[in-house]
Amino acid sequence: MQQNYGITNNNATPGDGMSFSFDITLNKGLHTTVHCVSLMLGGSGKWWAQEAVKEVPRLPTTEPNLSLVSLYMKYAHIGTDQISMEGLEKELQKLFAGGTPDDYVKCAAKKLSDLTGTDVADVFQKLAYGVDILSKLTGCSTVPVLSFTLSLSALSSMFKKIGSNLKSADAPVEEDSIFVALERYGDSELTAEAACLVDLLFIKNAYFGEINEQAHENIVNSLEDKFPTNDIVKFMGKLKVKTHELLTTSDLQSARRASVYINLYFRLANLRTIVLWQVFCIKQRSNYDQQSTRGVLAMINEGQKSDMEVMRYVTETSFQKAVFHTIFQPTENENFMNFICIHRIRIPSLGHDKKFCRQKHFIRSSKLPDYRFEMMSPKTDYIGGSQNSSFACKFYLEPVRNRKLDGIFYMRSVKWSDSYVSMDKDGKCVSVSDKPGTEGQWKVVRLGNEGLLPQFLFSSIKWPCKFLFLKSCWRTFSIEGTENLKASKENCLWEILDV
């Protein structure tokens, strides 16, 4: 005996959406052979499945509350590793509508399919692509998200594997650099709470990763209840407040402590992003309860808003946060870097300004603008303040290799191309031959000042928070370092002029 069961997507139009039909031969006993015929939607509004022949428990004539893709996956047993490239391409053609070349769509489909093979080396690049696709899916007003069931399955698989990979690469608490730093500052209670939350997020992601297309409606509808929302919001809120307080303090230890808090905050933010998008993909793919699915999306968006507030605290410069800006180096804070990678955020950086780095500069005092840096001679001589405009007062600011984002530079003389500005152990600026080590590397902090000529602070990398200032003694001026920034504020501010 043979029966055909057509499953129609009432919201679909030919060439749009995803649904399935089964050509079913009923065998003797309790089993059914399922022949999946096609993955195409016919002109009548009926879709046809393909690429699977499977003997399964007898297929009932009705399956209430199952989404179309769930029914297909349940009886044909097509897993995410066998997701049809043709199906992904059709979905992405709708997402990238508007004349997008076919080759671009094919490339995007392959990239999306490859996400399920994530390895540790490129976790955050792939995560960035996945989050970008999801942002496009949820922001697409012309095509319902339900039309992207294969994409959601691929993304769900990606989040599961990423969580597993990150967990396997996670260091024990006693070796974790963040927790070791927190212990050093006496934050044992914070360490315990943070470590528990990190473990809990990994456990939740592992649990959600096992929720497949066959999961019962009641399980899927209550997934968000299993996410530790209150614990995460409370702890990250506490971290946010503590960080904000520390940013404006003027002592070195508080600035370093703030850096640790920031790195911890973004570690939790990254894990929260992975877990909540995993929940969203599962719920949206199943299509049982759109209201609660929108609720999960709202949780994701609110979390990102809070994260961007912290990002703004960190990246917006001011004199009150000068010590922090001197200490905090983005490239030394792994979780902060992973966050800007995931969300494809560009943060302001002088080091990436090619014109600025190629240009010759005068560096002059904001308080006494007639006085500029001057290199008296190419070797072991003090750097003075001069009213001259000669070549000895012109410098290149060259980014230190791999530190462009941190805003760390060498100051090289234009007149003597092999001579650099360095700082000796007494805090005096001197000229040295050949490229120096950290004693001749400078953190350059640009201060926001509402459209006026920008002002800058220069601080030694070897001696953090020794800020360069213009020192006057018997009508002679020299450039030296001071740790008393507040008392020397006016003399520590500089302007960088293109020559």
Image (cartoon, rainbow, N blue to C red):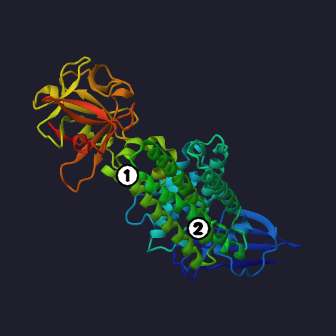
| Label 1 packing within 10 angstroms: few (<14), some (14-19), many (20+) | some
The percent coordinates of residue 486 (x first, y second) are 30, 45
For the N terminus, the image quarter is: bottom right
- Residue 158 seen in render: yes
Quadrant (top left/top right/bottom left/bottom right) for the C terminus: top left
Name the residue: 72% across, 70% down.
215
Mark 2 lies on residue: 280
The dot on residue 180 is none
**Residue 357: x %, y % from top left:** 26, 37
Q: Which secondary structure lies at badge 2?
A: helix
Residue drawn at point x = 54 percent, y = 75 percent: 294
Which percent across, then down, holds residue 144? 50, 74
Seen at 45% across and 65% down, the residue is 305
Residue type at mark 1?
Thr
Q: Which of 448 and 215 is in front in this view?
A: 448
- Residue 215 located left or right of residue 492: right
Tell me the mark number nearer the camera, choosing from 1 and 2.
1
On the rendered structure, is 443 left or right of 93?
A: left
Dot 1 corresponds to which residue? 315
Q: Inspect this view and state whether residue 317 appears.
A: no
Compared to residue 13, the image places residue 133 above or below, namely above
Q: In the figure, is residue 60 to the left or right of 164?
A: right
Place of residue 53 in the rendered image (x, y in percent of width and height, measured from the top left)? 74, 63
